[in-house]
Image (cartoon, helix red, strand yellow):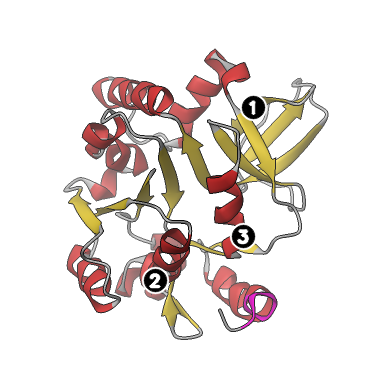
């Protein structure tokens, strides 16, 4: 199994902390988010990691070397990194169609390593991660469940949608090779249609709604994690998440 990490973007919403360096290089207890990702992936015996880079790409490449991971981690440069995450996914189309089972991961997440372990060890071939303990609002990407099937995956959920419960998507996914290939095709459609500014989750959502029976989820409620988007997320990560993680 291989892993893809999306790390090309500029963290504009993070202010000066996001402008000075890629978000995956933010450090908590002296370790960057990227180093934490790679430690967890290595622990899960992931064979190869591909990272899309763009903004301050050299800084990410330097970090990969600094943590001694350049023998199993490679970078793919996205020159259009300001145009959205779908472009980064499209840049990786050769890897999506290579016939491998894949993990797809956002780079800007601080998390308990057991979350990634759940995704790697699950018997669900095409798997989302769902956290029921979240604050509703416009920002979280929601997963809606009805009769144990995923029926929606989006920030904005239609008012007339019926579902049993909802959770927040962690931003990590597992796809078997056939679904990864379909994702490449769908991503190419978005780019060719001039819809590249849509979030990459929209392409995944299309596949989910086409064949919901193909997908499942792991409920990771209770395991700590946070996506770093805003300055207050850094404070919450330091004050609430790190103490729970301990000195990892």
Crowd tier of the residue under label 1, counting other residues whose Cα lies within 10 Å: few below 14, some 14–19, many 20 or above? many
Residue at (34% x, 24% y) in the render:
181
Q: Badge 2 is on which residue?
A: 35
Residue 99 in sight in this render: yes
Quadrant housing residue 123: top right
Image position of 144 (left or right of 233): right
Mark 1 or mark 3: whose residue is earlier in sequence: 3
Q: Residue furthest top?
A: 210
Point out the stretch of residues depicted in magenta.
Answer: 242-246
Residue at (25% x, 32% y) in the render:
93
On whether residue 243 falls in the magenta region, the answer is yes
For the residues labelled 1 and 3, the Cα–Cα distance comes to 25 Å
Q: Residue 152 carries which label?
A: 1
Quadrant housing residue 188: top left
Q: Residue 59 carries which label?
A: none
Q: What element carries label 2?
A: helix
Mark 3 or mark 2: whose residue is earlier in sequence: 2
Q: Where is residue 13 in the image (x, y as percent from the top left)?
A: 45, 61
For the residues labelled 1 and 2, the Cα–Cα distance comes to 32 Å
Q: Where is residue 182 in the image (x, y as percent from the top left)?
A: 38, 21
Identify which residue, 203 or 218, lies in the foreground. 218
Indicate whether 233 appears above or below 238: above
Q: Residue furthest right?
A: 164
Q: Which mark is residue 114?
A: 3
Q: Where is residue 84 in the image (x, y as percent from the top left)?
A: 33, 43
Placement of the C terminus among the 4 image quadrants: bottom right
């Amino acid at each position: 199994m291989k892993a893809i990490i999306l790390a090309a973007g500029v963290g504009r919403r993070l202010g000066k902390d996001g402008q000075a360096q890629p978000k995956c290089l933010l450090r908590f207890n002296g370790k960057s988010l990227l180093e934490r990702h790679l430690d967890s992936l290595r622990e899960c015996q992931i064979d190869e990691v591909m990272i899309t880079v763009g903004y301050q790409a050299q800084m990410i490449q330097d970090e990969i070397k600094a943590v001694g991971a350049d023998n199993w981690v490679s970078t793919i440069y996205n020159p259009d990194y300001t145009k959205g995450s779908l472009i980064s996914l499209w840049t990786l189309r050769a890897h999506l169609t290579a016939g491998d089972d894949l993990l797809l991961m956002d780079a800007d997440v601080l998390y308990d390593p057991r979350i990634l372990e759940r995704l790697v060890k699950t018997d669900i071939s095409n798997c989302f991660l769902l956290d029921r303990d979240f604050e509703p609002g416009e920002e979280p990407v929601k997963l809606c469940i009805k009769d144990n099937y995923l029926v929606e995956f989006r920030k904005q959920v239609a008012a007339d949608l019926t579902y049993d419960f909802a959770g927040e998507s962690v931003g990590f996914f597992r796809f078997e090779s056939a679904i990864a290939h379909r994702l490449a095709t769908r991503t190419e459609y978005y780019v060719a249609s001039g819809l590249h500014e849509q979030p990459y989750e929209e392409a995944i959502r299309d596949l989910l709604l086409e064949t919901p029976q193909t997908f499942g989820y792991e409920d990771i409620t209770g395991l700590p994690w946070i996506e770093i988007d805003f300055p207050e997320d850094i404070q919450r990560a330091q004050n609430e998440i790190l103490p729970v993680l301990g000195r990892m």
